[in-house]
Image: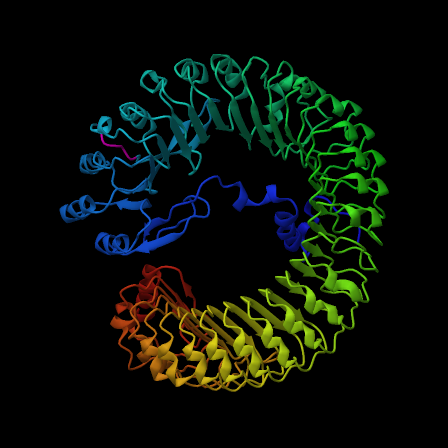
Amino acid sequence: MQGYRGNNCQRQWATYLIGLLTICLPDFSIAQQLTEQHLPWYIPQRSAPSRYIGSSAIIEYTSLQDLAEKLAQRTDGPYHLSIKLDKNPPAYWQQLRAIPPATSLAIELADSVMTDTLVAILASWNSLKRLDITGITGPRSYTIVTNAKGEKVFGSSIYTKRLSATGWGKLRSVQEVLISNEIDLNQAATVLRQLPALESLTIRQFLDRTIQNVPVEFAGLERLRKLTVSGGISWNYKQTFSALPDLDELVITDPDIRELNAGLPYLTKLTCLQITVFGRSTALHQLRLGGLTNLQSLYVMSRSQSAISLDSTLTGLTTLRRLSIEQTKLKSFPVSLLTNKKLTYLSMPDADLETIPDQIDQLPALEELILDNNPLHRLPAALGKLSRLNRLSVSKCELDSLPAAIGQLASLTGLSLNSNVLTALPASMGQLSQLRQLNVAMNQLTELPVELGTLPNLETIAAFWNKIARFPAGFSRVRDLYLTDNLLTELPAALGTLTHLRTLMVDNNQISSLPAGIGQLDSLQTLGIGGNPLTALPNSIGGLRRLNRLDLGMSQIRELPETIGGLTSLTSVSLKDMPLTRLPASIGAWRQVRQALFRLPQLESLPEEVGQWQHLESLTIESDRLLVLPEKLTDCQQLGYLSVTGKRLIGLPESIGKLISLSQITLDGRADSLSGQGIGKFTMLPAGIVNCKALTSLLVLNQQQFDGIEGMQLVERLPGLRYLSFVNCGLTELTGISWKKLQAFTVNLSRNRISQLPAGILDMPQLEQLNLSETNLPGPLNQFFFRRSELVQAFKKVSE
């Protein structure tokens, strides 16, 4: 395995590396970067949640009455809300007044003018902190206009939305406002100055980079502490910044660099600046920041194809504490940044840097240094003088060796060296007494130095995809050990002494047996041993009482020991590509299992004891020998996802209606590799499926003689069904179906032998997309319809 840089991340294991980085270097973890608990967002059904806050839970509502009922069930107080304004009737406003106030409100504005009624309602929402107002794309008109060069070109104009003109002064708690997409920015800035507590304003234009002039009259916005401007917006930086004396943070995209230079000196209190350049990236070197005497945090990102110098840009800055230069190719390391003696964080990945100067030790306060994906080849010995450095990341830097001075980094807690060409690690690393996480994955290491085994604080080692043939000695304090894809042939008999071990991943090695001592790892929570030539598991495996994740596959194990039922803490189990024909009844004791995947080609049955898995949420089975599912499976009341792939399955349990939480079913009978015809034996849905009221998605694929008509007659009694697919199932007609009762948004009937399509299908009240491709229907109907209107037009063409 050679070290790699750039776009070679397309390899199959790249995603595995990313996952490991979140463990090996906790600062990479998005979850750990969050500083507060995100509240749930309540959004209208079929709204896109992509612009809502990070990892917040998304809860859909169908009406304000439905929203009120959902909120009444909450016991944890604050929440975020999204609404859509589009000629709402008076009753809508009455219902909105009755719901509890939200903390954040996102408004999708389809009306040309935002109603005063809404502003009046919000005046009573004393907990409202944030407003997010976005215009829904409206019609455009196109004309021929003359550009600045006197050329005749096509121009477009949009029908912008306007905010309410009055009442904003009563919204005394709103501190943050985001305006985006086709809002009249001049008018918006005028009315928003009425907000007495406004501190943060974000203006974004996403569509066609439509130019709007931000007004220079910011006299009423002197209290702004943060301003974010992105998209196709032109404005006068000098006049704007002179009206914002207290601005502390500025985030700007694609600025005019010369105009920005003229305006920045007015921002005497600015401490945080973020500049992203997608367009004129070659002008970035003209940026001058030396006059910002209070600047502490600087983020610069561009996608320049040619290297630039930022030395002049940074000259004069002495107060920086954080500096990030992202995706910006540099001619050389900007030595002018070395005057920032209080700099604690420096990140310059993907910069094409070939050297780091020996003067790097002139940054005595540096705590984090990130230089990933630069062709450095070597690190300077002066790096060892950074006594406060606690995190160093030099992944994908083509390093073939490390300086011995790296052992002098006495404060280092996280070290990432993955994806280089290292063949050995220096023994001096045994001096890194504070080291907690070490990532040396994807190098050419043949062993880990014994000195590492004595480090008292080392908790996590990622050394997968190397050439390590011997299990490392020592490491008695290690909690997470990743040795996947190496050359290990055995695990040590003393493995059981690693009592702190929580994660052991040794997949894809050459291990033929497991030591009995593995059962003594009483702290072990995750075990990955797939891809090894194992023929059996030791009986002691059942001693892993705290194991919550088991990944076992690609081996020659024909039978699992009964003692495996002792894994009573399992929450996730994956058994793949083994010649197992049965699973022991003792697995019924896995009562904490939430996710189970069995990809076992020869599996003939599941034991009835799986019905004891009361916490089971997801079950995926792939087997060409499985005929039926156990009836007791329907005792798993929390089961929400069921997927069965195999050509011999003949039916589902008659009592499936007991699965009141079941929301998704997929039944794939496989297709013949030559003809493409479905070869599955599944013929009929059980009548009890009508009691699965939570079902939203039903996919039946590649079955020989599936009764699709009866299937539709059953699912028309499921009001929550939104996605319905009967694909390659031998359907020849669609008769006797009450289309008005089917509530699906998307229906897929492709690859069937349907020759006639009843016009009644248009009676489906929620239908949006319909796939009729590869059927026997006439040409206009034999396609995927992305909109109902396209289907209507196709019917007209057929009838002509």
Which image quadrant for residue 60?
bottom left
**Over which residues does the magenta segment extend?**
161-165
Which image quadrant for residue 135?
top left
Query: Whole-percent x and y of residue 537?
Result: 70, 76
Which of the two residues, 714 or 280, is positioned nearer the viewer here? 714
Task: Specify whether 202 is left or right of 26.
Answer: left
Query: Whole-percent x and y of residue 200?
Result: 39, 28
* 224 is within the stretch colored magenta: no
Query: Which quarter of the rendered picture does the N terminus lie within?
Result: bottom right
Which of the two residues, 796 or 360, is positioned nearer the viewer here? 360
Which of the two residues, 189 or 494, is positioned nearer the viewer here? 494
Query: Whole-percent x and y of residue 285?
Result: 63, 22
Query: Which quarter of the rendered picture does the C terminus lie within?
Result: bottom left
How many marks on residues? 0
Q: Main secondary structure of the magenta part?
A: loop
Task: Specify whether 224 is left or right of 796.
Answer: right
> Looking at the image, which residue is at 79% across and 42% down?
398
Query: Whole-percent x and y of residue 525?
Result: 61, 61
Does residue 529 appear anywhere in the picture?
no
> Looking at the image, which residue is at 26% across and 65% down?
765
> Looking at the image, which residue is at 53% across and 80% down?
677
Does residue 758 appear anywhere in the picture?
yes
Which image quadrant for residue 575?
bottom right
